[in-house]
Image (cartoon, rainbow, N blue to C red):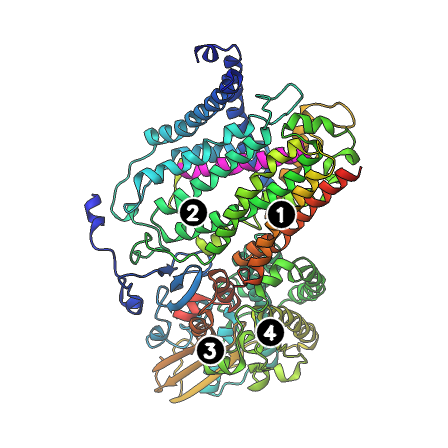
Amino acid sequence: MDSVFHQEPFRGDYYTRRFEPGPDDSTLILNMGPQHPSTHGVLRVVVELEGEYILRAEPVLGYLHRMHEKMGETRSYLQYMPNMGRVDYLHPLAWNHAYVCAVEKLGNIEVPRRAEFIRVITSELNRISSHLLWWGAYLLDLGAFTPIMYAFEERERIQDLLQEPTGSRLTYSFFRPGGVAADLSPEFLQGVREFIPYMRSRLPMYKDLVTDNIILRYRCEEVGELPLDMARRYGASGPVLRASGMAYDVRRAEPYSVYPELEFATPVSQRTDAMGRYKVRLAEIEESLKILEQAVEMIPEGEILVKGAPKPRWKAPAGEVYQAVEGARGKIGVHILSAGSAQPYRIKLRAPGFSNLSLFAELAKGTLLSDAVSILGSLDLVIPEIDR
Amino acid sequence: MPPHLLSDYLFVLVFLLVGLVFAIAPVLLAAIITPRGVGLKRLTTYESGMAPIGQAWIQFGVSYYLFALIFLAFDVDVLYLFPVLVAYGSFPWRDLVGIALFVGILSLAIVYAWCKGVFEW
Amino acid sequence: MEATLLDPRMFRIVAAAMALAAFVGLNALVLVYLERKIAGHVQRRPGPFEVGPHGLLQPLADALKLIGKQLFRPAGADALLFWMAPVVSFIPVLPLFLPIPFDPDLVAMHVEPGLLLILAFTGINVLALCMAGWGSNNKWSLLGASRAVAQSVAYEIPLLMALLAVTFMHGSLNLSEIVEAQGAWPWQWNAFIQPVAFIVYFTCAVAETNRAPFDLPEAESELTAGFHTEYSGMGFGLFFLAEYANMIVVCAVATALFLGGWQGPFFSGWWWFLAKTYALLMVIIWFRWTYPRVRFDQLLNINWKWLLPLSMVNLMVTALVMKLF
């Protein structure tokens, strides 16, 4: 049986064609992923190592490709909703939001004001839970095992809250073109009111125990410095872009829903390194809390689904729309081309993680393997979203 | 070699042998009772789930080999301090001066490496 | 030679070796349980709870599972190195316990240069890691092994220096003598007379046993599992056992040298020794579940830029103070 393995060593596959080992190479060509603890799922990064330094790194995608875009062409507008819960499993409500807004734009559908507030409240809660999970997972990448358990405690409260109206805990498909699927109960709103001070009381603890830890600071500061021009060149968005010093937030730049009525800041950091991205995300949790605080007070009574909202066999008018929203990872875009039938002619999804990941090849060059893990974690990648 | 020293060595050897037995016994036990599944894929080298590209047995550039060089100098030298400590105190001041010279020269190695930028990478 | 083989002490030594082997195994079970329970409580969850009352039988179940798992050697690996590595990592563990005085009488053998014996045998462990890393023919293992070598090699020097400072004070390498030279009360312990040496020693001990935050050779978020990536079942189990045994040894040495060994303010005896050792072990476990992992260059720089100069200065100050008083 051994003879099988004493053939020529494996020279790599299609994706490693640029990593051919030379005759007298002192470099290691290494697959980091798809089964690797710090690639968060099934990302594969082919790296060439000289000692522990990375000479080249190339992300390879496609291990979780589920043809979300193609599926859109064979499903009616409502049938496509569950897909939006599964593109980014950490912030699915933002994808929900982008998709329903696009369909509403296409069909000129009015959305009741209460439904808009429900969307904002649930999606901001979801944003907090996404940032919390990122926080825990990033620290796990850096070798701290405990913070994720604390983050999950808060995340659990959010999920317990969201479970009631949405009926699920992870892959929400809660929004509908023209409104939302279920109304928020007074208990839910009370739960959110109680959650806000609780979450605020936890943030100083995170700062004391984790953010100010000297080991963590040395692992994040001056690691993965991303200049603004490079971030823009790659189309980075979300916290990655804001940590490079640009205050770009879709909620402010291309306002949608009731965000213009709410007061919140756009956290920006000039640090440009992994610590900057870390701090921007933690600051965003606070801003989301501010939004929640206002929204639960401002939410009016009324309809949650507009009369004449799209039915399952609804035919959209022919046309082309694009809608962007701010997800936890950056700018989420949904582009729908309709030929006037019950199914979209083409759906294009713009995943923020895809652009943010494309930075990695350039950012990781010349860093240590440990730093590359830190950089990869600080980009906050969700692989299903990147592969789509 | 005095006989009591020999028996001391023998005792260490006994400990090593018992250690060997205790190390091999569970592995042998495991080898007897564990399942013997076969299949080509399960014997492939683990490289994050992909077929490995090339061998791991290559000339591998260890960027911190300089540290190992300083260590070599240090470790051998530090060993000389062990006999010193047993005799320390039997001379009025001479042994202190001796140690100061020894450690002083030793620390020059660090100063040298520091200046040469070995610790910056 | 015959005389030594028939030495009446021979029986005692074999019995001591067996007892210590059992002690090592039992301690590993206790430590696994402690580790998981402490981790659980640090993370505000109960830890193992299902197997036995309060999960007490969990480590036993783990051990059985490890023995029952299939042993693999990857096709490309070097058979000799691959199988020798776990055995080599475990063998030196027992002689490490040889000179450790749990009690004035409860010591396997009174070795005059006892400390030297311990230091000599701790060095073998890194050889095993190196063999495992190279023999696996796996790139993660290779990276882990090269880290392990650089790390334990670097941290050995301040460790030696810190120990030297203490032994200089007593002029002896015999652990029992050093314990007896300290008093029963905490302020008579070397940890308070030599605080710098104690801190340097303990830091180095954590690094030498490859425990977090210095667990770089097996940094699982970077190197999947480092040097033992390819080991399954008991192959991994032996590394695991050796790691825990080494933890006990470094803590026992710290107890003997710095914390007054078996001496306590009341009821002196081996229970004091075990209590102090376990207290130190819990500190190491506590570190692991609190801190992130350091980066490799930082790890080496902490050593060369801080611990080593500090321990050298400490040694010189000790030598000077001894002359003055």
Q: Identify residue for label 2.
A: C227
- Identify the residue shown where x is 69% and y is 72%: A293
Q: Amino acid at mark 1?
A: Phe
- Per the model, the C-alpha gap separating discs 4 and 2 is 51 Å
Q: Nearer the viewer, mark 1 or mark 3?
A: 1
Please state the chain letter of the residue tagged with numbered disc 4 in the rendered image: A
Q: Is residue C302 left or right of residue A341?
A: right
- Per the model, the C-alpha gap separating discs 3 and 2 is 47 Å
Q: Are marks 1 and 2 on the same chain?
A: yes
Q: Secondary structure at mark 4?
A: helix
Whether A367 is drawn above or below C81: the answer is below
Q: What secondary structure do most residues of the magenta stretch adopt?
A: helix
> x, y percentage for residue A72?
36, 75
Q: Amino acid at mark 3?
A: Tyr
Residue range in magenta is: C235-257
Label 4 close to label 3 by CB (< 8 Å) = no
Q: Is residue A250 visible?
A: yes
Residue A11 is drawn in which quadrant? bottom left
Q: Secondary structure at mark 1?
A: helix
Q: Nearer the viewer, mark 1 or mark 2?
A: 2
> Tag 1: Cα neighbours inside 10 Å, few (<14), some, or many (≥20)?
some
Please state the chain letter of the residue tagged with numbered disc 3 in the rendered image: A
Q: Identify residue for label 1.
A: C287
Whether B93 is drawn above or below A179: the answer is above
- Per the model, the C-alpha gap separating discs 4 and 3 is 16 Å
